[in-house]
Amino acid sequence: MAYYAIILWVLPLYLGIGVVAIICVVAIYPISVGLSFSALSALLPLFMVTLLVVAIIICCKAKMGGYMVQNFYLKINIRLGHLKN
């Protein structure tokens, strides 16, 4: 779970989502094929929680990016004199 968070935090959002999606597909494949290892069955709830955390990180990172763009836009317009303090 920590690996997903680090990948999403370090990489840009479009690359992070791709890497995490590939890792998730590779992790789900043995379960979908029907390999019934007890370890895989035991890790499935943890995997679901990991997907929830990944979704939260993606939403927060996208929202943060929107705030940074808005902040940059406002700073530029204040410098150009379009907006008053």
Image: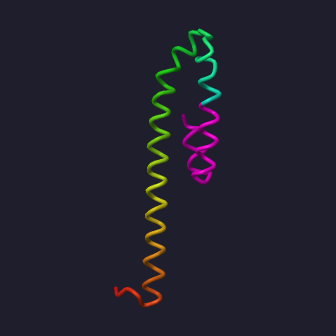
Main secondary structure found in the magenta portion: helix
Residue 27 figure quarter = top right
Determine which quarter of the picture holds residue 34.
Answer: top right
Horizontal side of 40 relative to 74 (left or right) equals right
Which residue is situated farthest in the front direction here? 33
Residue 41 locus on image (x, y percent): 53, 14
Magenta range is 1-24
The quadrant of the rendering that contains the N terminus is: top right
Tell me residue 55's x, y (percent): 47, 41
**Residue 52 drawn above or below residue 40:** below
Residue drawn 44% across the image and 83% down it: 77
Which image quadrant: the C terminus? bottom left
Q: Is residue 4 magenta?
A: yes
Residue at x-position 57% and y-position 14%: 39
Q: Is residue 11 left or right of residue 51?
A: right
Task: Give the answer, above or below, for where 72 lies relative to 21.
Answer: below
For image coordinates 62% across by 11% down, the residue present is 35
x, y percent for residue 43: 53, 20
Q: Which residue is at 57% across, 52% downward?
A: 13
Q: Check the image and report above or below for 40 versus 24.
A: above
Image vertical order of residue 66 relative to residue 81, above or below:
above
Q: Position of residue 4 (x, y in %)?
A: 57, 39
